[in-house]
Image (spheres, coloured by chain):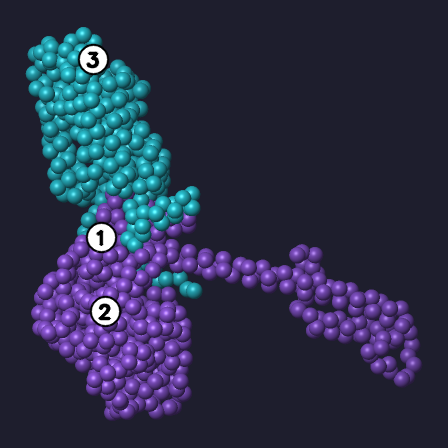
Chain colours: A cyan, B purple
Amino acid sequence: MTRPLKKMLPQTHSGASVSDVMMWVLLAMLPGIAAQTYFFGWGTLLNIFLCGLGCVACEVFALHLRGRDIRTGVMDLSALITAVLLGITLPSGATWWIPLLGSAFAILLGKHAYGGLGQNVFNPAMAGYVFLLLSFPLAMTQWPAPLGTNTIDGTTMATALHVVRENQSLLMADLWQRQPLMGSWGGRGWEWVNIGFLAGGLLLLHRKIFSWHAPLAMLATLAFCSAIFYDNGSSASGGSPTFHLFSGATMVGAFFILTEPVTSPTTTRGRLIAGVLVGALTYLLRHASSYPDGVAFAILLMNFTAPLLDQYTQPRALGHTRKTLRNKVKSDD
Amino acid sequence: MNAPLWPMRGGITPPPNKQQSNAAPIRFAGIPPELIFPLSQRHSAAIPVVATGQQVLKGELIARAGDEFGAPLHASSSGEIIAIETRAIAHETAHTSRCIVLRTDGNDSWRERYPIVDFAQVDATQLIERIRHAGVIGAGGAGFPAARKLIGDKNQPQSISTLIINGAECEPYITADDRLMRERAHEIVQGIRVLQQILQPQKTLFGIEDEQADALTAMRAATIGTDIHVVAVPTLYPTGGEGQLIQVLTGNEVPAAGNPADIGVLCFNVGTAAAIYRAVVLDEPMLSRIVTISGRACSHNGNFEVLIGTPLPALLAQAGYNAAINTTLIAGGAMMGLPLKTADIPITKTSHCFIAGTAEEFPQLPAAQACIRCGYCSEVCPAALLPQQLYAHARAGNDLQLHAHHLFDCIECGACDFICPSHIPLAQQFRDAKHELRVLAFEQLQAPIAKQRFIAHQARTARQQQERELSRQQRLRNTAGLEPEAVPQPDTSTPAAEDNKKAAIQAAIARAKAKKAGAPQRPADDQHKP
């Protein structure tokens, strides 16, 4: 037998490109970024700018080291997305080297150490964020007071999620009245940031950039868990479903991090399971851990399971029954 | 009447590019001075039954089928066989084939024909034999012999409930079936009636894409008063795939390791139906077919009725082909077609389209980037596979995972390539992977045979060594003064020095004899190795 000829089919293409996809993702993050800048100050934009600088520089450096085409590597815009995602997780007003260090970790160790775009096991931005959080816990948890809290400008404090977790004595209703960090239904300021990212996420859903499975599963699970442990707003309550949906990194996590294709499952059922996992873990970590938010850890933990989920959630191929499918997977293990 | 439709899995909507070639009526491409008939077929090569220099009439048998998956070849015009030699062909795994070359005389004179006026009176088995002898094969592209499809493995007409006629020409650029349906609806309907006569199906569904409005109108008009149901199916690539059309029209899936007949369905292309009509009713073997010539490097695009064996350059010339601006020449459609390295090939029974594209029409696609596992490919995959996983496993050479991810259910439609934002040549990768696994399976099949050969070889070597040892001892005895029996002694007495010389010569003769008796000797240092 001779080998088939090279490069044959097909000779036509839809015109879709990685950079188009990434460009839409970047655009869709604008409303959330705008809200975050409005409530937490220009530091947000400065963080994103520094992360952009750091990420692109590290990307160029890593591509050069690996002998890859630098232009293609940078033009796919994936490094910029990592930069923006990392930038918005950092407290506004963080010291200048924090974004740069996080970027270096995210791109060099989180991404290129695994083989670059498409090969990384963990979401680079989340890896960078967790690295910073574990290394510099104080700097990473001091957020400026959101706009409208009637405190002197520049005061740094914990977030609404932290307040609810630490609360031992007050009913939820009282907490809402006394605590300046609580907004109308979520954390002050954060509720609008979350609405911004939700809007961007819906735009991407509409553009069919990703499927609805993972975000919906995550949000539904988070709402479900918080509803169970709401405890009618008692002092032991974990916070209401709306509070959890519109506080912290919920929406950005559901629509911009969980849907990052490289590190999450690629099958429909796998994505549903991953969403449920992340939703449940987020709630658990918010409720029981000592970190400011649970989304980043939940997603990193889910990243571990992605290959396994892919393996065991294969769709039923045309002309196969579920039974033959399962037998085949079993016999091949 | 409209039958209910079921959704197809996945699918894409590439630019159809049909208007380039579907406006003009079918033209006859004429009789070229030379006709070339490649002998290579699906699994075997056809066997020539003519000799160089022989005169043949149009429709005369020139090669018989090599096996049950092959089909006989017939002279598509009258003339003289001038050569049986190796020529270039269009095929995915080969560049050349042995071909029968016929120089036409221009008279186009027919052999005697025996038309059947009323095929309803003819036995199904006889009809199938007639189709087999006419060399009718699937005109859709796969080239499976129609007669073999009709009898299946049981050597009698297949027992099916639904006959499906495939008029869903979903590939971009191709309009051969479209024009055929618009202009020769009657031939197709007669062909379908022959098929109905053979198969006795409970219902006959005729699927045509809903955007082919003229073809739908023509076929609806031609099937009034028959029990053929013309169904408009959604325009979606690859609806025209056999498994896909069956799914859309019946809601059933063809079992992965099986055939449509397993679920009581048989599917024939409209071109095949028309060829069956000609074979059965007119006693005309498959001598010509409709070929689309499209692409911007041709000024007079359209559909041609082409004699099988016509050289492609002769056909392209009729369409106003401009080689200077032609950068991409494709045999087939823009999705599943085969890029040609040379235009110097003949038209075969499975050639349905040639696209001569310009650089502007087929720009160089960007280089492949890394897979980002976006999963768009699995959304459009009509076989419900996970191309992104298959790709990773194919690159890793993980054969077990490739089987577990159903590599062999891939129909190579290229929908995943079309949608891939990283421009990865997925279908090509899968085709290569399939090829490698087939080679591997073939080699595994050969392994026990090779082992037997090796054992036999070892036994033979051991025997030869023993024989050599014996003859060596014989030589030693000879040199010690004993007379060898085999070699006659000279009658004159000789000095001792002469004796020694003779013994040496005899030893050389004995060595040569031993060498002749056995296999070629290995170098001395190799002899202790197994």
Asked whether the residues under marks 1 and 3 belong to the same chain, the reply is: no
**Residue identified by numbered label 1:** B9
Query: Whole-Å distance between the Cαs marked 1 and 2?
Result: 26 Å
Quadrant of residue B183 within the rendered picture: bottom left
Is there CB contact under 8 Å for labels 1 and 3? no
Residue at (40%, 82%) from the top-left corner?
A: B48
Q: Secondary structure at mark 1?
A: loop
Q: In this orientation, does residue B288 appear?
A: yes
**Where B474 sits versus B378, above or below?**
below
Quadrant for the C terminus of chain A, please.
Answer: top left
Q: Secondary structure at mark 2?
A: loop
Query: Whole-Å distance between the Cαs marked 2 and 3?
Result: 71 Å
Mark linked to residue A236: 3
Query: Whole-Å distance between the Cαs marked 1 and 3?
Result: 49 Å
**Where B296 sits versus A212, above or below?**
below
Quadrant for the N terminus of chain A, please.
Answer: bottom left
Residue at (39%, 59%) from the top-left corner?
A: B435
User: How would you rate the neighbour count of disc 2 (Cα within 10 Å): few for under 14, some for 14-19, many for 20 or more?
Assistant: some
Q: Nearer the viewer, residue A2 or B363?
A: A2
Tell me which amino acid carries mark 3: Ala
Q: Is residue B449 left or right of residue B48?
A: right
Point out the frontmost of discs 2 and 3.
Answer: 2
Tell me which amino acid carries mark 1: Arg
**Residue identified by numbered label 2:** B201
Q: Nearer the viewer, residue B376 or B213?
A: B213
- Give the percent coordinates (x, y) of residue A42: 13, 23
**Dot placed on the residue nearer the N-terminal end, 1 or 2:** 1
User: How would you rate the neighbour count of disc 3 (Cα within 10 Å): few for under 14, some for 14-19, many for 20 or more?
Assistant: some
Residue at (72%, 65%) from the top-left corner?
A: B463
User: How would you rate the neighbour count of disc 1 (Cα within 10 Å): few for under 14, some for 14-19, many for 20 or more?
Assistant: some
Quadrant of residue A23 within the rendered picture: top left
